[in-house]
Image: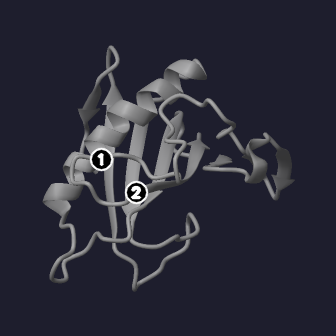
């Protein structure tokens, strides 16, 4: 699995090996689809969303790209952004961030997974107190087609 952190310090690209995964900082200045002011990404709900990382995963036997975002306002508590609203934001992030990323890096993923978490959670670890929403998409002619998980 390859991990691409969202925003390396100073905007420089770096490579390092951690275990069996290659860590790749891809968010150098000028990356397509990435917000540059404060790292907040615009979404239809208007909630604050930041890109935590991108995982390039071949573990399911095919190429999956996992775009992981932090959206601290999601959740079922009063005033929180519920799943129905967050689903629209996830589709928007697939269309406006994942598709340009795939085209820029000339990738052909079988699936793109967009996830929102109310706090940073290390991939593969459970965090019972965290609220997390996930959606899977198939890319077809520059469109995100919902696959459901």
Residue 118 image position (x, y, % from top left): 39, 71
Lateral position of residue 69 relative to residue 47, left or right: right
Q: How is the image coloured?
A: one colour
Q: Pointer 1: what residue?
A: 43
Residue at point 35%, 41% (across, down): 93
Q: Rate crowding at label 1 as few (under 14), some (14 to 19) or many (20 or more) other CA atoms within 10 Å.
A: some
Where is residue 128 drawn, in percent x and y?
A: 41, 84
- When asked about the image quadrant of residue 96, the answer is top left
Q: Residue sitting at 64 percent across and 40 percent down?
A: 27
Residues marked 2 and 1 touching at CB (< 8 Å) = yes
Real-space Cα distance between discs 2 and 1? 8 Å
**Can you name the residue that lies furthest to the top here?**
141
118 is higher (above) or lower (below) than 77 = above
Residue at 19%, 83% in the rendered image = 77
Mark seen at residue 84: none
Whether residue 37 is visible, yes or no, is yes
Residue 21 seen from this side = no
Q: Position of residue 120 (x, y in %)?
A: 52, 70
């Amino acid at each position: 699995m390859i991990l691409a952190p969202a925003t390396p310090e100073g905007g420089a690209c770096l490579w390092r090996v951690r275990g069996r995964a290659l860590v790749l900082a891809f968010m150098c200045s000028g990356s397509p689809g990435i917000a540059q002011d404060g790292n907040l990404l615009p979404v239809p709900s208007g909630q604050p969303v930041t890109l935590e990382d991108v995982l390039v995963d071949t573990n399911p036997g095919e190429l999956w790209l996992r775009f992981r975002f932090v959206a601290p306002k999601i959740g079922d508590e009063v005033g929180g952004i519920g799943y129905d609203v967050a689903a629209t934001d996830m589709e928007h992030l697939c269309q406006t961030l994942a598709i340009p990323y795939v085209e820029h890096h000339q990738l052909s993923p079988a699936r793109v997974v967009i996830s929102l978490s109310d706090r940073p959670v290390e991939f593969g670890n459970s965090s019972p107190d965290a609220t997390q929403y996930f959606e899977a998409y198939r890319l077809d002619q520059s469109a995100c087609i919902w696959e459901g998980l």
